[in-house]
Image: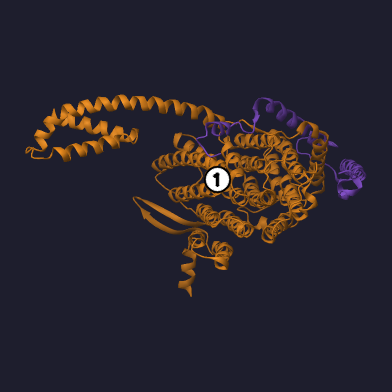
Chain colours: A orange, B purple
Amino acid sequence: MREARTMIEWLQPAFILFLAALLVGPARGHLRSAVILVAPLLTLWAIWQVPDGAVVTLPFLDYQLTPLAGSPLRRLFATIFALMAFTGGLFAFRQARWQELAAAHAYAAGAIGCSFAGDLVTLFIYWEIMALFSTLVVLCGGTPAARRAGFRYAVMHLVGGVVLMVGIVGVIQQTGTLAVQPLRAVDPATWMVLIGLLVNAAAPPVSAWLADAYPEASPTGSVFLSAFTTKTAVLALILLFPGEPVLIGVGLYMVMYGIIYALLENNVRRILAYSIVNQVGFMVCAIGIGTEMALNGAAAHAFAHIIYKALLLMSAGTVVYRTGKNLCTEVGGLFRTMPLTAACGIIGALAISGFPLTSGFTTKTMISEAAANEHLGLVYMLLAAASAGVFLHAGIKFPWFVFFQKDSGLRPKDAPWNMGLAMVIFAALCILIGVYPQPLYDLLPYPVDYQAYKAAKVVYYLQLLLFSGLAFFLLLPLMRRTRTVSLDFDWLWRVVFARAGAGGYAALGALRGGLESALRELRALLRRPARALLAPKPDGDDVAESARDGLIARDWAIGAAALWVAVLFIGYMVAYFL
Amino acid sequence: MTNPKDDHWLVRPDTIRLLWRVFIAILLVAVAVQFLSGSDGHFGIDGWIGFGAVYGFLSCLAMVLVAKGLGAFLKRPDDHYTKDYDAGGAHDD
């Protein structure tokens, strides 16, 4: 019995979802549905078998790997990731392509693997697994726009991954340990780790990748995408950089960036994507504050955020699935025939705005309270303004433009049963955590000494939110939707870098042409002495020799890297014969 | 919709007028109730009666105006990034 228990404790919960991801393809019909829905629940069970501390250690070079380490914080994040994999699977399993479902499960497995990674190398491996499979989820959008967005997404995450890896190697060299432990951004290595993590959190100046890629995924794919990458980054930041002061500024920038860009946006799912950046900004800011209450707030808000953000994207995804339309200017008045989708969308919108009795209120206000306790007046006031802004850009804007405003004349059917059920489950959780937050508070990393419902606080937030609502309806004429996109820093790499790249590529091509002809002459010069030395008997080898030369010549044309190898080789030959 | 009475009850002008009245009543109550609940001030000024209301409204006004102003510089037609693909014909967009 004791033996069996040990075996279970050793199990990395992520492996269950990896196995499921492998089985989704070969399985058919009901078996496939069962794999998709049962695997996350088994994973959830396994997550709660992981004990505290380093569970598994392996020797690696001179170091100790810890592929599996438990703590309340790690289990909290793994729990919401598994819950997300289940509800997202329920939402998607009848509509999405199996490739997307398999990729989504592997992606969730990567996030759970990160949650339990006790050392930096393991963390990095799961981090890259997430980058790979999330790219596949974007690509499953299936359109040319999704392919291009997926490519940009992959490049961004690979570059971020390289920065993170170099930073990790530097940190390991300095500290002599692989352990995941709190750091300060004081030297190039720790800065690179921080930057690598912040790329995945969609921090400035690369926030644009998120709003670029997520809305191009399928209606079901963007639900999965909303949950894992940014929140894994939040967990990694809590573990590695709690109380890092620079994060307060970064977080506040993200909060305001998300609001402004969402206000300008016309694409329904892109509005919600910008508001992910906004919400993650609250968490990043809390991690920067770094007190126990702030870190509790960041963790609790991440938990609540995954639920209501997925709910919002499910609601938007159902609309896209039923109407095939992505833009605010194309929809409107859908509450008539999609009452369930509208109701769930409104509950998600109230939760993201932090309305009392929703999960946003019981979690986000912890962050504001933590700022107030540290006497960070400006931060506190900006977070309050941002709370009002969230209601403005997501809380009312999303349901208003999609389900109300003018009647688009569209009369789509309401959500299919599985999509509806997934939305109802998450809507219920939004309210449950709002009304009775204690079970969530009990899961937080530090003891919670926080009273969410004090009359004065409830009144303050109600005023803040209700008058934002008033502002929205009075300012509606200023917020007319336009068929536009908004420039961001991504203009640099989508236009400037792309053109510079094309120019550079042409220049390289010309350079390569010149070098190739020079090399050909050089080779002709070297040929005779080389043959004299290497092949002293010139009996009929000529044909084979020239054929081989032809092959080498063709290889050079493949790319600059091959050319450099050739240059080095020629250099070596020259040195050898001299 | 030719006759507003034919449309969903929620979007009839009568209903919308009623909703506005209810909304304004709720706004007034939200401020008035502060006399009973006391204030949640941490920094003095945010404990004033009606501070949340004024601050919420003005924050939103500021954000909408900033967005509007930035939009003048940042907004582009929504084929801004894709028109090269459309015009070039090299990609199947």
Which of B35/B56 is in front? B56
Residue B18 x, y percent position in the rendering? 92, 45
Q: Is residue B47 visible?
A: no
Residue under the image location 49 percent in, 30 percent down: A498
Tell me which corner region of the image, top left, top right, bottom left or bottom right, holds residue A419. bottom right
Q: Residue furthest bottom?
A: A1
Is residue B29 rendered to the left or right of residue A337? right
Pointer 1: what residue? A233
Q: Amino acid at mark 1?
A: Ala
Q: Count residues near mark 1 (Cα–Cα under 10 Å), then give few for <14, some for 14-19, many for 20+.
A: many
Residue under the image location 7 percent in, 37 percent down: A536
Tell me which corner region of the image, top left, top right, bottom left or bottom right, holds residue A251. top right
Using the image, determine if residue A249 lies above or below residue A333: above
Residue A249 x, y percent position in the rendering? 61, 34
Residue A488 x, y percent position in the rendering? 60, 31
For disc 1, the chain is: A
Is residue A406 rendered to the left or right of residue A115? right
Which of A311/B81 is in front? B81
Residue under the image location 25 percent in, 39 percent down: A551
Q: Quadrant of the C terminus of chain B?
A: top right
